[in-house]
Amino acid sequence: MQIIVNGTIEQELVDRLIAEEKETFARQRKSIAKIVLTDCGDEIEVKTYEESPIRRIRRITGYLAETSHLVLDSFNPQGVWWTWPFGRRWSLREVLPWPFTFETGSRVETWFLRPALWLGTVLLIARCLGVVPR
């Protein structure tokens, strides 16, 4: 958390104002990115900026997209280069029996995996935004 003090403000007052802002944001389950305290003569202006959850969501969905892409492509007969640029392509068809493997665009993918991935992604984003309790 970044704290910026503009003007001459006593350290005791700065600490008290920061504690109040932290308490207010904690009640709302939000994170503080920056607090700017400005001495305006008779008053002290307090501006508090919330930490954006968007960056975290973008990172999580990026990892989720890559991982799900590799895992689901492993079910295809063509396989995936898990050890790229070394080695060969790997397919779960070599390891799993028939019912657990499927082709791209098959009914298993269309009616089971796609909805499951969509639901998982929506729940993950909702949890990151604080809509769903942890």
Image: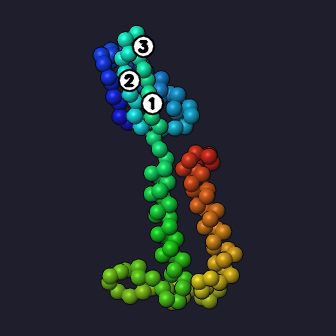
Q: Residues within 10 Å of mark 1 (few under 14, many from 20)?
A: some
Mark number, residue 58? none
**Is 94 in front, or is 2?**
2
* Gap in angstroms between the C-alphas marked 1 and 2: 9 Å
* Residue under the point 41% across and 17% down: 44
Instruction: Work out which residue is located at the far top of the displayed protein and give it.
Output: 42
Quadrant location of residue 114?
bottom right
Q: Which residue is mark 2?
A: 37
Answer with left or right where residue 127 lies relative to residue 14.
right
Secondary structure under badge 1?
strand
Locate residue 6, reporting x and y percent.
32, 23
**Type of the residue with mark 2:** Leu
**Residue 39 visible:** yes
Residue assigned mark 3:
43
Q: Residues within 10 Å of mark 3 (few under 14, many from 20)?
A: few
Identify the residue under disc 1.
Answer: 48
Q: Which sits earlier in the primary sequence, circle 3 or circle 2?
A: 2
Q: Residue at x 35, y 34 (%)?
A: 2
Q: Residue at x 52, y 28 (%)?
A: 24
Secondary structure of the residue carrying tag 2 is strand
Q: Is residue 101 left or right of residue 85?
A: right
Q: Tell me how far mark 3 sits from mark 2, CA to CA.
A: 10 Å
Q: Is residue 105 above or below residue 49?
A: below
Which label's residue is closer to the chain start, 1 or 2? Answer: 2
> Looking at the picture, does residue 80 appear above or below residue 4?
below
